[in-house]
Image (cartoon, helix red, strand yellow):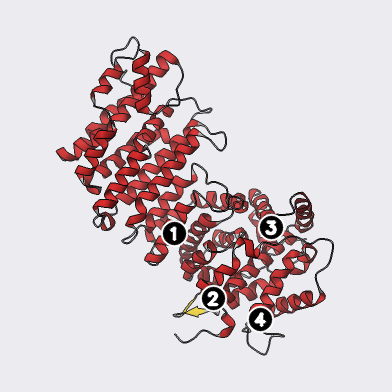
Amino acid sequence: MGDPPPLWGRPLNEYVASYQFEKTKQRGIFNIDPPTTLTREAADALSALGGARDGAGPSESALSIPVTIGNIQAVLRLIHYPRTYRHLAQPSAIGGCIKLMSSIKLDGKSSPFSYEYGYLCFRVLTIVLGRCLLHRSDKLDNCILGIEQDVRMSPQRDIIQLFSHYVSISLCMELSLKNQVQLDQILGWIIVERQPKQPPLVTIPDTELLFTILWDDRKMFFKALRSTYYPGISAVIFILWHLSCREQNPNKIKFQSTALTEITFRYNLISTSDQKRALDFINMDRGTTNRVITWERDMKQVDLEDCRQVIGTYINRFEPLNPTLYEPISVLDGPIILRTVALFVTQGTEDLLPTILQVTVKHIWDEIKNPSEPTKPDVYVDAIRDTIPNYATILRNRPVFGRINYDLSQGLVDTIVNYDLIDLVARGILMLDLASGPPAHEHAGSVDYLNRVQIFYAQLAAGTVPKKVLIRDLRAFISPVAQVSELSRLVPGDPAPRPCGSYTKSRSFGANIRGAMTRSEWAASSLLALPVMTAHIVVQFVDRWTGELEALGVRTQFYALRQRR
């Protein structure tokens, strides 16, 4: 490839430094109008973008002015002035941004995020689309009033973050109505009888083009957005989702489902908290279809760098650098996202694997010990239940674990020991029998908790790490097996645990594993399985004698109960 046109501006590795939060943060200006020159330049740029939508390129004479980076930045500077938001609601500019993004190609495929020009076009697209959606749903005036009130209360708030928050709330309100006709009308994709005819906010062909652009450039899209402050593309996700919902062509359905699932997953990892409400609705809808399953089956990694970026972003999500923009991830979201992160594990990511387990387990423990919000016990059970098999998927990746070295094996076992994964699994068992309000739904963690734990332990002991590492460290971690029989005698009036419910399952837990393992593997898994059986005896003891559960680890509970006896 030759030198890129000067119009494209700086490459990604250079431009991202200019779009960090502290450099792009803007405060609202309500009492004065923007300078006339700025207004005129932005208006000319929006008009030129409208011309680009009709097929003219950024340097063609058909445009009133060339659409340069400076012109685009003029549009973005108007964000300071909420009074101008009505003027920014120009649908033709959305299609123009898409067309200009598609003109930036590398190796025959669109790659707008590789250069500053394409990145800025996407920023304008996001902002104008949000303004138009608010305008069409009659919420723009209330949005402007709300922003003004919020700024008076918190002058330091970034105005684009506030605006993005209102876009997300508005989308959530529209989506909750589940009225596809109304959504089509807002987008201008249908004509409703006795309703004013409205031009499309973005045409269906342009939306299909945007699908292709984001899919082809998904690596750089993710890299650019994770490296900059970029709030509020839930409106973009919305139009992609809505198009895929109404699509009838089988070939287009397959592509759109695949592209939407991966684009949404990537954005979920990096989205600011103000977008959560609208994204949650779209995510729930995707979860009720076969979209995710289809994508997981057909998913193809881009390259090693991209895989490491995705895994690294998952790890960093648990301790965000800017808590103002990113709230702590929920106790359930981490284990659920882990299932998809496992698809990005490949040769060259081995060093990240112990840390994946570490941050996930630590977060569940932190929430159990110090909940960020009131949480029922079965939520923790579900979180543990989902973590175990999703990480087991990583353990089954033979091309990766066939290459894992001794130090990394030791790191994995150290994580299991140091972050009390075995105690965490046993704690989940203690919670299985705790009252949690209404009966658990059919997919609750209590349904197949032990089965999933069994799969994880079996996978860990079946060759993932060297046996000498596994057996040595875990034997030092767990007390002798004799403690199980000793603890069983502490249950008042019942020398042996009653053979029912989940305890019966735990008794068969070891037998099921043993049938599929060699003698050395069985020795390792027996050590792992011990707290499972111990936990059930503790449950019976608590239930039949104390009636309450102390907030202690399984081993600590055992010794406390023995002393109490």
Identify the secondary structure beneath mark 4. loop
Q: Residues within 10 Å of mark 1 (few under 14, many from 20)?
A: many
Residue type of the residue flagged with mark 4:
Val
- The foreground one among 164 and 23 is 23
Task: Specify which label sits upstream in the sequence, 1 or 4.
Answer: 4
Task: Specify which label sits upstream in the sequence, 3 or 1.
Answer: 3
Query: Looking at the image, is 2 positioned above or below residue 53?
Result: below
Identify the secondary structure beneath mark 1. helix
Residue at image coords 52%, 76%: 11
Q: Residues within 10 Å of mark 3 (few under 14, many from 20)?
A: some
Quick check: marks 3 and 1 in contact, CB under 8 Å? no
Q: Judge left or right: residue 399 versus residue 341.
A: left
Residue picked out by circle 4: 67
Query: Looking at the image, is 90 positioned above or below residue 141?
Result: below
Displayed quadrant of residue 442:
top left
Residue picked out by circle 3: 158
Residue at image coords 21%, 47%: 466
Task: Specify which label sits upstream in the sequence, 3 or 4.
Answer: 4
Q: Judge left or right: residue 130 versus residue 472.
A: right
Q: CA distance from mark 3 to mark 4?
A: 27 Å
Q: CA distance from mark 2 to mark 1?
A: 21 Å
- The foreground one among 405 and 98 is 405
